[in-house]
Image (cartoon, rainbow, N blue to C red):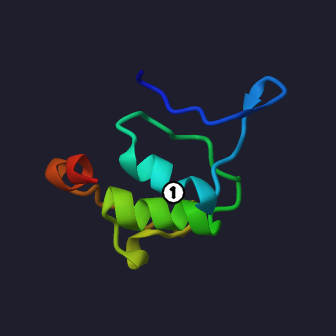
Amino acid sequence: MNHCIVTFIEANPAWLTDADFEFLQKSPAFFGRKFPDDIHTPIRRRVLTELVGLTPEQVVPPEDDAPVTVAPARAVAAA
């Protein structure tokens, strides 16, 4: 399975929450675009720092135009 879809709300996948973090941590599946729109949502920040490997300083609003460095592949694969 390539994509991680936990639940649906009508025809759309439900947003991920902190309750889903352990599942995401263990899953090899993709799960992008299933976060609430607010970039400050705790689950989005937690995934970016703990699973992707970004530092808290790299998790910034897109309007800040700050460059975001992607973690090395080994760090992402280990997550």
Q: Secondary structure at mark 1?
A: helix
Q: Quadrant of the N terminus?
A: top left
Q: Residue at x 15, y 51 (%)?
A: 74
Q: Position of residue 17 (x, y in %)?
A: 64, 56
Quarter-wise, where is residue 53 in the image? bottom left
Residue 67 visible in the picture: no
Q: Position of residue 79 (x, y in %)?
A: 29, 53
For residue 11, say whether it is visible.
yes
Q: Is 74 displayed left or right of 41 in the figure?
A: left
Q: Residue furthest right?
A: 10
Is 65 or 23 nearer to us in this picture? 23
Tag 1 residue: 21
Image coordinates for residue 41, horizontal then vertical, percent:
65, 66
Q: Is residue 53 left or right of residue 58?
A: left
Task: Classify 74 as above or below 34.
Answer: below
Q: Nearer the viewer, residue 37 or 12?
A: 12
Front residue of 72/19: it is 19
Say which residue appears at 25% left-offset and 57% top-offset. 71
- What's the residue at 69%, 46% (across, down)? 15
The quarter holding residue 7 reads top right
Q: Please name the residue shown 50% across and 70% down the image.
A: 60
